[in-house]
Amino acid sequence: MRLLCLFIFLNSSFITWAQSDKATKKDSTEAAIAFVKAWEKDFLDMGMSLQKDSLHINEETKRLLLDSSYRKATYPANYNWPDAIALMKKMDLKKAFYHIINLYRTDTAHQELALQTFVLYDSLVDMEKILMNSFYTYSLLDPQVCVIKNGKPDIQHPDVLESKFATVKEIIEIVKLNRKPVASK
């Protein structure tokens, strides 16, 4: 067994060197496609949802429940535009959109910027679905709404949750009003 491992190790550089450009390109293309599919699945997945008779909790929500340092990093004490923009640059759009939803609520001087962001993205993706997914992924575990006790959320402020939901519905209605009609052929 050791001899086989040594043989593989010594010849691994030769095997890599002997691969054709097509094989290398195919490997990187497949990896890129896998990355995009995983990103899209997460982007379109709701954090918590009822499916038939069971509660579905995605990996992001599980991480928020179980990892207190991740939870603290996800929910800033004060939402701000530089953090939202940094999340957008990292393509962590669902989290960025949740930040912008909160900015829309608290930064009235820049509400138009938040709306323009959502309207712009609506031309690329279904913002109604994405905003709801962002809400259901992040709002239920938001420290402004609940505390985590023994790994379970305890909603302390349902009024804040309802207010955030009303904000999401308001944004969705404004996005719908600003949709450009699809040109027919």
Image (spheres, rainbow, N blue to C red):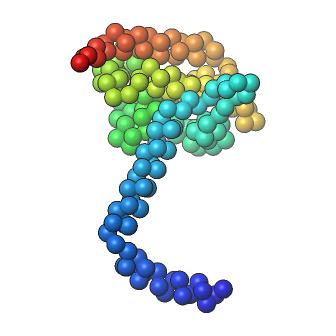
Which quadrant of the rendered structure holds the C terminus? top left
Residue 95 in percent (x, y) is at 47, 33
Q: Is residue 34 above or below residue 60?
A: below
Whole-percent x, y for residue 154 in the image: 71, 25
- Residue at image coords 53%, 83%: 8
Name the spot of residue 141 as percent of width and height, x first. 61, 28
Q: Quadrant of residue 146?
A: top right
Q: Is residue 72 visible?
A: yes
Quadrant in the rendering for residue 47: top right
Q: Residue at x 36, y 79 (%)?
A: 17
* Quadrant showing the N terminus: bottom right
Kindly tell me whether residue 86 is visible in this rendering. no
Residue 3 drawn above or below residue 79? below
Q: Going 63% across and 15% down the picture, which residue do you hit? A: 158
Say which of 102 and 25 sits in front: 25
Residue at image position (34%, 41%) is 89
181 vs 14, left or right, is left
